[in-house]
Amino acid sequence: MLKLLIADAGEEFRMALTEQARGMYRIRVCQEGKETLQTMLRFKPDLVVLDMMLPGLDGISILQDASDAGVHPTVLATTKFASDYLAESAHRLGVGYMMVKPCDVRATLARLKDLTEHLNPAETLHQDPRTAVSNTLLALGFSTKLRGYGYLREAILETMRCPGQMVTKELYPKVGKLFDATGIQVERSIRSAIGKAWDQREETVWRQYFPCTSDASPERPTNSAFISRIAERMNLEQIV
């Protein structure tokens, strides 16, 4: 598994990208320049997502010092201020791609995958199904403390394996057997978990999975709609 260093001063972006990339790479995380340089020299990452304006030591200085020490990772640079000097320096120091902040997490992950494939076409980027589904539910705001989270994860995994099965008569009882619960308990817990995540949802994240098709206010997906949509999305991303 390739090694990835995520170095960004913004906690929200840094943690969100870490969650999305978990299971694909061996990850280290930094938020300050000198710490980033030390981690690069010690960890020797294959790839780095690097905020070029880190406090303590800027990105160009980090890359120069790392290069002098013989560390040459593939770099995805992020910056609030693009300039010819920065672009030229970044190219000279081996930056593979540059994004202007604020960066969308999913777009950043997609560019990271592109760089990884270029770096090593044989390296697999697919998460195992359980990790991928867990990360998706976390990104959508589901709490792992709820019973419905575990039921929902297993329901999605089962639907990925066997699409088209009857939700009430087949899927809920199958999931219930895994937890010594009834189908009715599974249905109610999943509905409650979806409701709580929906009420506290981050709109931009949910729209990536459940896009609005009209100007009307979006409706909360039913259990079956949610399960089938996430399962379909996971299968389309070829993670199984």
Image (tube, helix red, strand yellow):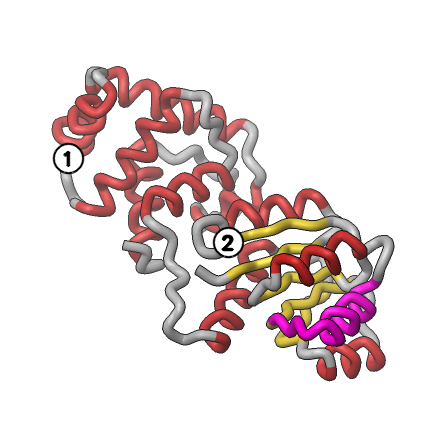
Q: For residue 69: magenta?
A: yes
Compared across the picture, whether 113 is left or right of 70 comes to: left
The image quadrant where one finds the C terminus is bottom left
Residue type at mark 1: give it: Met
> What is the quadrant of residue 99 in the picture?
bottom right
Residue at 67% in and 43% down? 12
Q: Position of residue 229 (x, y in %)?
A: 33, 45
> Which residue carries the number 1 mark?
166
Prevailing secondary structure class for the magenta stretch in the rendered image? helix
Disc 1 and disc 2: Cα gap in Å? 38 Å
Nearer to me, 228 or 62:
62
Rendered position, 6 above or below 113: above
SS class of the residue under badge 2?
strand
Q: For residue 205: magenta?
A: no
Q: Position of residue 98 (x, y in %)?
A: 68, 71
Magenta span covers which residues?
Answer: 58-73
Q: Nearer the viewer, mark 1 or mark 2?
A: 2
Residue at 16% in and 45% down? 162
> Which residue carries the number 2 mark?
26
| Of the image marks 1 and 2, the number of the one nearer the N terminus | 2
Q: Position of residue 171 (x, y in %)?
A: 18, 32
Q: Residues within 10 Å of mark 1 (few under 14, many from 20)?
A: few
Rendered position, 16 above or below 83: above
Nearer to me, 57 or 128:
57
